[in-house]
Image: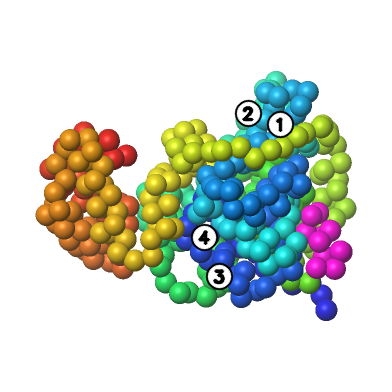
Amino acid sequence: MTASLHILGIRHHGPGSARMVLRALEDLKPDAILIEGPPDAAELIEMASDKEMQPPVALLVYEPDAPQEASYFPFAEFSPEWQAIRFGLKKRAEVRFIDLPRSMRPPSAKVTEAGDAPPQPIDALEQLAHATGYSDGEAWWSRLIEERRGEDEPMSVFDAIREAMSSLREKFSGPEHAASRDPEEIAREAYMRRSIRAAIKEGFKRVAIVCGAWHAPVLTQEALGTFSAKEDDAVLKGLEKRKTAATWIPWTHGRLAFDSGYGAGVTSPGWYEHLWVHHDRIAERWLTSVARLMREEDLEGSPANVIESVRLSESLAMLRGRAAPGLEEFTEATLSVLCAGNPLPLKVIE
């Protein structure tokens, strides 16, 4: 029996992604779960099963001889990787991190050669959003994936995500887009394929791979043939190896926000936590929380205004052809009703 690979391409902190990952893992019953994360922290994975380990938390990976060279890898309760780790530990599956180790990445102080321009990364969400008529990639992905409440077959959704990313990667594969190819990303994907090959060689038969959606097309069984082991080894051969250490540390939802400067951040961690925790009456619960916050700040937030805000958000969703209101509709309804059109109180909520 040959190994079967199942690629779960996700948003790093997304409740819809996390739900689909859990449902897919329940169906697949993998004997190995490979996760885009730092292998430097391999010995710390088991600690995630501790009931006292309550997210948000982060893995801190640093160089003991140069502690300023440190990286943080955050996890929220609604992070797909966190849910995959907990699932794998509970089911006694092999759980591994397969991203390029921090010990093999260039130091942050390293600069490009004179005259070189830094890579301009492709924003996959923005590109796909614009193709479907959205102006905001984050809002598009949230609406399509993270806010979905249906019972779709999870692997069919992951397959569709992988196909979309594959088309996008092909579009940007020409020499005119060479400036967007980050050498570190190329090395990361080569290392992930090396790790997948190692798991197959060790005899694991049902392998689930949880990775950022952008990487999904180059980690498939077909990709293992397209990118040979020899080629991947050549990419990784010249990387300097340094000593690293790792530990778990507390984190905050505020630091998961994109506005904090976190590259993989989301627009509203509070909204995503709300979607993860609550399975019904999403509008009523969210807008009640908004009104409670406003009253704590001595602002108007009556039950009547909450009811009217719920009605308005649902009407907006219906006019836009959406099955249910999302954060955009709730924000507009809050501004119109609870804030009486005044944007200043909205800043308190944001």
Q: CA distance from mark 4 to mark 3?
A: 10 Å
Q: Looking at this view, is 199 or 286 the one in front?
A: 286
For marks 1 and 4 on the same chain, the one whose residue lies earlier in the sequence: 4
Label 1 sits on residue: 62
For residue 206, side relative to residue 152 (left or right): right
In the image, residue 309 lies at what x, y percent? 18, 54
For marks 3 and 1 on the same chain, the one whose residue lies earlier in the sequence: 3
The image's mark for residue 23 is 3
Tell me the kind of residue under disc 1. Answer: Tyr
For marks 4 and 3 on the same chain, the one whose residue lies earlier in the sequence: 4
Magenta span contains residue 73: no
Q: Number of callouts in the render? A: 4
Label 2 sits on residue: 117
Label 4 sits on residue: 17
In the image, residue 313 lies at what x, y percent? 22, 57
Identify the secondary structure beneath mark 3: helix
Q: CA distance from mark 4 to mark 2?
A: 34 Å
Q: Looking at this view, is 119 or 174 the one in front?
A: 119
In the image, residue 228 lies at what x, y percent? 83, 57
Magenta span contains residue 198: yes
In the image, residue 83 lies at what x, y percent? 58, 58
Tell me the kind of residue under disc 4. Answer: Ser
Identify the secondary structure beneath mark 4: helix
The residue depicted at 73 percent of the width and 65 percent of the height is 93
Q: Looking at this view, is 79 or 341 the one in front?
A: 79
Q: CA distance from mark 3 to mark 1?
A: 34 Å
Q: Quadrant of the C terminus?
A: top left
Q: Quadrant of the N terminus?
A: bottom right
Question: Colour scheme of this structure image?
Answer: rainbow
For marks 3 and 2 on the same chain, the one whose residue lies earlier in the sequence: 3
Q: Which contiguous range is marked in magenta?
A: 194-204
Point out the frontmost of discs 4 and 3: 3
